[in-house]
Image (cartoon, coloured by chain):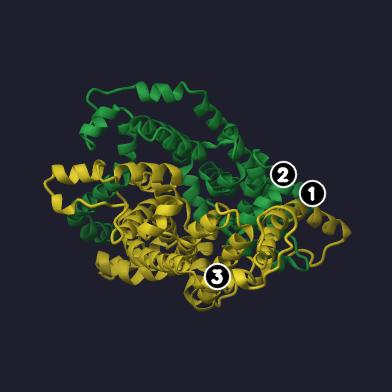
Chain colours: A yellow, B green
């Protein structure tokens, strides 16, 4: 029992050290493999074990992505081989289409608003929920509920609730707040904020759970030491919890950015392909579906996918380079605890 | 010890607690209100909803739920979703576990590159690949079939699965491996006898993520399934909502029934998901 405790503390200590400084190397003795190379038997095992996953992954993930890049240069309706090569014309059309530019603008808005709104709120909630209090576990489950519900259910529910004659407006009228009654879904100046509210509602639980998991990785001893030194609750949160939550925060922000760039389901379900652009909530992916598959123009749809992919890739690489770097620095090269 | 207790209890507990509870309660209410609206709305009649959109059922009306539960369409869609999600989960976990085992515990040239390849998969979400993927599925003759969504879903679940599982498998101490090798265990034998049991928490986490992802999946079924017979619940819910758009109460009943399985599944395994996200083997 005592040994397992000490190794656990040891592992936590090491994790902390890595989070802190980044450069610490784990003791080499326990990280050494028995044999560096593999015999033929080992190679066969590697092949058998990785093979199936690799085939699936290359066939259904990498191959389609590569094909998208190829089809993007054709005027292709989705049947027969793509023969009508049109060069970069699809890409020129996309980049000059005001509808695509508007969609891109909405995506950028959603990326920024998600970070600015969801980040602080979810960190605050995670800090509050990290305290020992009765009912904590049930509260955590309840906060996560919207994340688990499917986008279709959320979309259907909210579009009924937010109709002009729907439950929300009725509630506002009953409360005498007629000034707050709006056409939540169709009014161009409000719709995107409605979307933001729904997105926050749906995805904040994920952020909170992630942050709670991060907070739980912080050793109790630090809090005890700070408390002994007379630090107040908020001082402890500011000086210990927040800095040590850094890596989790940066990972969350990355997931949030990528997710916001590729937003589709909720918008498509609530606004549909036509209303989304008039209500000002269209995204790059709703644009892709409307002008690709639904218009029967698969070459064009592929080109939109490529543009979307390149934008995500650039954002991801920049983020990786400037923000995530110190967190992932050891992750790929260093074996050991994670 | 007593000093510590006082120090810890004194400042945060006494005065913040009511405020904390109040904030938390408000948040919970905001999170649950839309869900309750859908569930409770299913117990109302259409005229109740028209006259008083935000009211309570008066009287409670069980007909909507009864009708949905009595319809063959609903159960067929539940079955389709269950089959799809179960097959996706099994496939993703099996393939992902095998690959993660190699990446975590074998040393060979190209291991880092292989890991990076799977990790890069996080950058290729379904949305980007959907148009050519549709072509791939079509040329495999899998349009309008459940395997047509299961196979791609397995492939797209692999990156997350592998990335979560690798640290789990790496965390298994080398000493255990060495001991089993000394006892005459092969690497594969070690995989079956030691790794699988020790990786259970991670497996459950990725299994749940794969299951919920598949259960809630929308874009892929939207492209692949045109035939109502093959619809999964999300497509079915949307089809139902547009088909009975005037029958709001019934739509609400259908919608709330379709979210139950994912909720039940989640509440059973909530701890596992949280544990898995921390990425560490729990003691």
Residue A109 percent coordinates (x, y)? 38, 67
Q: Secondary structure at mark 1?
A: loop
Query: Of circles 1 and 3, which is in front?
Result: 3
Identify the residue at image location x=44%, y=57%: A210
Up-down relation of residue B23 to residue B48 (above or below): below
Q: In this view of the protein, can residue A150 be seen by the observer?
A: no
Identify the residue at image location x=39%, y=71%: A243
Residue B280 percent coordinates (x, y)? 54, 56
CA neighbours of label 3 inside 10 A, class few (<14), some (14 to 19), many (20+): some
* Residue B76: image tag: none
Q: Chain of mark 1?
A: B
The quarter of the rendered structure image containing the N terminus of chain B is bottom left
Residue A327 percent coordinates (x, y)? 52, 72
Up-down relation of residue B154 to residue A279 (above or below): above
Q: Image check: B216 left or right of A106? A: right
Residue B240 percent coordinates (x, y)? 45, 34
Q: Image check: A235 left or right of B111? A: left
CA neighbours of label 1 inside 10 A, class few (<14), some (14 to 19), many (20+): some
> Closest to the observer: B267 or A288?
A288
Dots 2 and 1: beta carbons under 8 Å?
yes
Q: Chain of mark 3?
A: A
* Residue B193: image tag: 2
CA neighbours of label 2 inside 10 A, class few (<14), some (14 to 19), many (20+): few
């Amino acid at each position: 029992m005592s040994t397992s405790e000490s190794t656990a503390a040891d592992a936590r200590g090491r994790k902390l050290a890595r989070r802190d400084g980044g450069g610490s190397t784990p003791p080499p003795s326990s990280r050494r493999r028995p044999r560096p190379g593999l015999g033929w038997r080992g190679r066969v095992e590697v092949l058998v074990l990785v093979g199936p996953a690799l085939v699936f992954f290359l066939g259904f993930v990498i191959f389609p992505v590569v094909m998208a890049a190829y089809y993007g240069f054709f005027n292709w309706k989705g049947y027969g081989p793509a023969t009508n090569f049109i060069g970069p014309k699809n890409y020129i059309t996309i980049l000059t289409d005001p509808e695509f530019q508007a969609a891109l603008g909405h995506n950028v808005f959603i990326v920024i608003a998600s970070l600015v709104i969801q980040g602080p709120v979810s960190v605050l909630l995670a800090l509050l929920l990290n305290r020992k209090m009765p009912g904590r576990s049930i509260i955590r489950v309840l906060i996560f509920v919207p994340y688990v519900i499917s986008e279709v259910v959320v979309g259907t529910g909210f579009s009924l609730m937010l109709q002009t004659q729907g439950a929300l407006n009725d509630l506002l009228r009953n409360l005498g707040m007629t000034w707050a009654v709006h056409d939540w879904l169709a009014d161009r100046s409000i719709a995107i904020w409605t979307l933001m509210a729904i997105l926050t509602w749906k995805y904040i639980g994920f952020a909170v759970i992630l942050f709670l998991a991060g907070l739980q990785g912080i050793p109790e001893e630090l809090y005890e030491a700070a408390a002994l030194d007379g630090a107040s609750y908020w001082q402890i949160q500011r000086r210990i919890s927040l800095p040590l939550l850094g890596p989790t925060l940066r990972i969350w922000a990355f997931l949030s950015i990528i997710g916001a760039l590729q937003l589709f389901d909720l918008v498509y379900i609530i606004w549909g392909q036509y209303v989304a652009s008039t209500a000002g909530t269209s995204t790059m992916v709703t644009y892709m579906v409307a002008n690709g598959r639904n218009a029967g123009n698969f070459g064009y749809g592929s080109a939109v996918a490529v543009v979307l992919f390149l934008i995500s890739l650039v954002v991801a690489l920049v983020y990786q380079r400037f923000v995530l770097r110190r967190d992932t620095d050891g992750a790929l090269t260093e074996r050991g605890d994670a | 010890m007593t000093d510590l207790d006082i120090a810890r209890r004194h400042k945060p507990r006494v005065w913040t607690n009511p405020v904390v509870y109040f904030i938390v309660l408000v948040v919970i209410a905001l999170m649950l209100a839309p869900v309750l609206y859908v569930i409770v709305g299913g117990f109302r009649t259409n005229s109740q909803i028209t006259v008083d959109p935000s009211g309570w059922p008066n009287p409670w009306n069980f007909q909507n739920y009864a009708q949905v539960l009595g319809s063959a369409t609903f159960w067929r869609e539940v079955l389709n979703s269950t089959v799809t999600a179960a097959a996706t989960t099994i496939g993703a976990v099996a393939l992902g576990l095998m690959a993660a085992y190699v990446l975590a515990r074998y040393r060979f040239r190209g291991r880092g590159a292989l890991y990076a390849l799977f990790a890069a998969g996080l950058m290729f979400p379904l949305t980007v690949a959907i148009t050519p993927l549709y072509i791939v599925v079509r040329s495999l003759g899998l349009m309008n079939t459940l395997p047509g969504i299961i196979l791609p879903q397995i492939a797209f679940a692999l990156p997350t699965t592998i990335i979560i599982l690798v640290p789990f498998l790496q965390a298994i101490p080398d000493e255990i491996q060495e001991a089993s090798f000394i006892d005459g265990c092969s690497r594969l034998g070690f995989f079956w006898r030691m790794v699988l049991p020790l990786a259970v928490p991670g497996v459950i986490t990725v299994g749940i993520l794969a299951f919920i992802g598949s259960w809630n999946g929308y874009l892929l079924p939207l492209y692949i399934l045109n035939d109502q017979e093959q619809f999964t619940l999300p497509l079915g819910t949307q089809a139902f909502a547009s088909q009975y758009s005037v029958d709001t109460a019934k739509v609400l009943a259908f919608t709330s029934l379709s979210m139950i399985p994912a909720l039940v599944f989640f509440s059973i395994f909530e701890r596992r998901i949280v544990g898995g996200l921390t990425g560490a083997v729990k003691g």
